[in-house]
Image: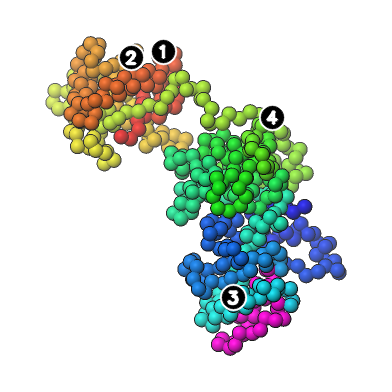
């Protein structure tokens, strides 16, 4: 049975040697062997169209493009990865050992040693001549390693070389940290497999799901099993919904098999295992490749316990761990708060609602009032940035603290902003309500806000519909008596008066 692993060991070859064992390594009859440590591109980003043609592996030697001096290797040689590695090493060593400018050595003995097919010899002879030329011009560098690193993933992707089991810890590289070219290819490959969840959550997506699907597509035999350590978010978050479906076929796009689906087994939630494995909570996704329709995991198993030390061996860790069945609601399901909160709390435009204290002058603001003015920002957009600021004396009960993302820090909060909120303690007030005239200062402020909106042509027709929509939303956003008393960006902040976190206009 063939097994592929992805190791985080400081030197991945140590895992290979440990698997062989000291007795086999020291045995008198042990044959020569090599440890296959590669820096290969497991994802094969775009390589199906740039590295492989119908009969050869093409390795560019200048600028990452295909030129006349590409190094070509017959596709037949890739079937035996070990022999290919040794052959490339032999060619690289011979090219480097000759005197610069000297004739290109014959490869007849090399062809016999490695049993190179007669039809493949002319191509290898031409490739070896180019390697000698690279050496003569000071560009030999590490071509032998480079070629083998490119070829090994292609060799493993051959149907005859695919493995029965894949176990590993894929890269959790976040989309926001990918270089521009990788972002483009990641989005294209994710879209083809139904993994792209849209720009709204793009920054929360990472490479792990696409890596597992791509590795399954390229390297795992049908019915082969896999298990990967993944971010805990894979079990529930919307950006992984396509991955959780088990339907991983690339929609006919290049590379791998056309039908790539996974039957997922019960997932493992490792969040309660302490000390934590990684800074980000972890889980394990398991399953097998199938030609049938993909299927989601039947459930989740919670692992919990405190291990005496990090990276403890299994005999020490196992007694400290418990496992229990659990149900994990995916984020695509309706939230229990959906009846009370819709989009969260919004205030648009901000400068009509967010305010800052103003000087009252020699006569003051009057009993029960507070002198305020619009809080302006350089982030304002048109048409709001072109409108004049408001100022006036508003009844204190309408000037409320407002928490935004700007005022919330890890484990603490900063001083909240101030805002004029049309809430009298029982209902949301409108400029057309007679009740608003009981509060002259607020009525003047709020009606001037309406005048600002009326002077914007594109808002005149939508104003009535928007007012009704906001009224309905506010009825959900600001709960009635007995409901939570504070809000921050649509989330409950216990013990605070009603305040609203806006979106930026």
Position of 413 with respect to 227 (left or right) is left
State the CA–CA distance, disc 4 to disc 3: 58 Å
Position of 233 with respect to 439 (left or right) is right
Q: Is residue 95 above or below residue 428?
A: below
Residue placed most toward the observer, 246 or 36: 246
Image mark for residue 427: 2
State the CA–CA distance, disc 2 to disc 1: 11 Å
Pair 2/1: label in front: 2
Outermost residue, bottom direction? 102
State the CA–CA distance, disc 4 to disc 1: 39 Å
Question: Pointer 1: what residue?
Answer: 481
Dominant secondary structure of the magenta stretch? helix
Crowding at mark 4 (Cα within 10 Å: few <14, some 14-19, many 20+) = some
Precedes in sequence: disc 3 or disc 1 = 3
The answer to whether residue 275 shows anywhere in this view is no
Crowding at mark 3 (Cα within 10 Å: few <14, some 14-19, many 20+) = some
Name which quarter of the figure residue 350 lies in: top left
Precedes in sequence: disc 4 or disc 2 = 4
Name which quarter of the figure residue 430 lies in: top left
Image mark for residue 325: 4
- Magenta-drawn segment: 84-111
- Image point 78% across, 44% down: which residue? 315
Do tag 3 and tag 1 residues touch (Cβ < 8 Å)?
no
How many numbered marks are there?
A: 4
Question: Pointer 3: what residue?
Answer: 127
Q: Is residue 281 above or below residue 131?
A: above
State the CA–CA distance, disc 4 to disc 2: 46 Å
- Image point 61% across, 65% down: which residue? 55
Dot 2 lies on which element?
Answer: loop
């Amino acid at each position: 049975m063939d097994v592929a692993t992805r190791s985080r060991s400081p030197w991945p070859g140590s895992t290979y040697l440990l698997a062989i064992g000291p007795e086999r390594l020291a045995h008198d009859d042990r044959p020569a062997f090599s440890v296959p440590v590669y820096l290969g591109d497991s994802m094969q980003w775009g390589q199906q169209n740039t590295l492989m043609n119908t009969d050869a592996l093409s390795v560019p030697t200048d600028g990452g493009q295909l030129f006349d001096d590409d190094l070509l290797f017959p596709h037949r040689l890739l079937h035996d990865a070990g022999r290919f590695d040794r052959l490339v090493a032999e060619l690289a060593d011979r090219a480097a050992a000759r005197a610069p400018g000297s004739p290109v050595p014959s490869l007849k003995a090399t062809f016999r040693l490695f049993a190179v097919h007669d039809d493949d010899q002319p191509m290898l002879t031409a490739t070896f001549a180019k390697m000698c030329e690279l050496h003569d011009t000071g560009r030999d560098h590490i071509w032998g390693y480079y070629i083998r690193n490119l070829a090994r993933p292609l060799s493993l992707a051959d149907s005859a070389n695919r493995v029965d089991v894949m176990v590993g810890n894929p890269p959790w590289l976040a989309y926001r940290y990918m270089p521009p070219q990788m972002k483009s290819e990641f989005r294209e490959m994710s879209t083809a497999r139904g993994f792209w969840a849209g720009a709204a959550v793009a920054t929360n997506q990472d490479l792990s799901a696409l890596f597992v699907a791509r590795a399954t597509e390229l390297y795992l035999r049908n019915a082969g099993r896999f298990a990967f350590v993944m971010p805990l978010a894979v079990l529930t978050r919307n950006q992984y919904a396509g991955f959780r479906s088990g339907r991983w076929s690339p929609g006919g796009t290049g590379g791998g098999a056309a039908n790539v689906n996974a039957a997922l087994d019960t997932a493992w939630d490792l969040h309660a295992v302490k000390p934590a494995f990684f800074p980000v909570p972890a889980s394990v996704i398991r399953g097998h490749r199938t030609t049938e329709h993909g299927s989601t995991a039947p459930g989740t198993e919670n692992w919990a316990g405190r291990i005496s030390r990090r990276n403890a061996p299994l005999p020490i860790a196992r007694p400290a761990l418990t496992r229990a069945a659990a149900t994990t609601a995916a984020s695509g399901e309706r939230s229990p708060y959906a009846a009370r909160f819709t989009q969260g709390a919004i205030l648009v435009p901000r400068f009509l609602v967010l305010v800052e204290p103003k000087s009252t002058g020699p006569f003051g603001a009057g009993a029960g009032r507070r002198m305020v003015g619009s809080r302006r920002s350089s982030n304002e957009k048109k048409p709001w940035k072109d409108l004049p600021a408001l100022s006036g004396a508003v009844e204190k009960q309408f000037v409320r603290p407002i928490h935004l993302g700007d005022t919330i820090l890890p484990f603490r909060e900063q001083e909240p902003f101030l805002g004029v909120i049309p809430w009298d303690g029982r209902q949301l007030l409108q400029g057309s309500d007679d009740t608003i005239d009981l509060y002259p200062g607020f009525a003047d402020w709020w009606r001037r806000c309406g005048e600002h909106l009326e002077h914007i042509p594109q808002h005149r027709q939508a104003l009535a519909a928007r007012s009704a929509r906001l009224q309905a939303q506010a009825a959900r956003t600001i709960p009635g008596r007995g409901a939570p008393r504070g809000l921050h960006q649509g989330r409950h902040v216990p013990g605070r008066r009603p305040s609203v976190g806006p979106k930026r206009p």
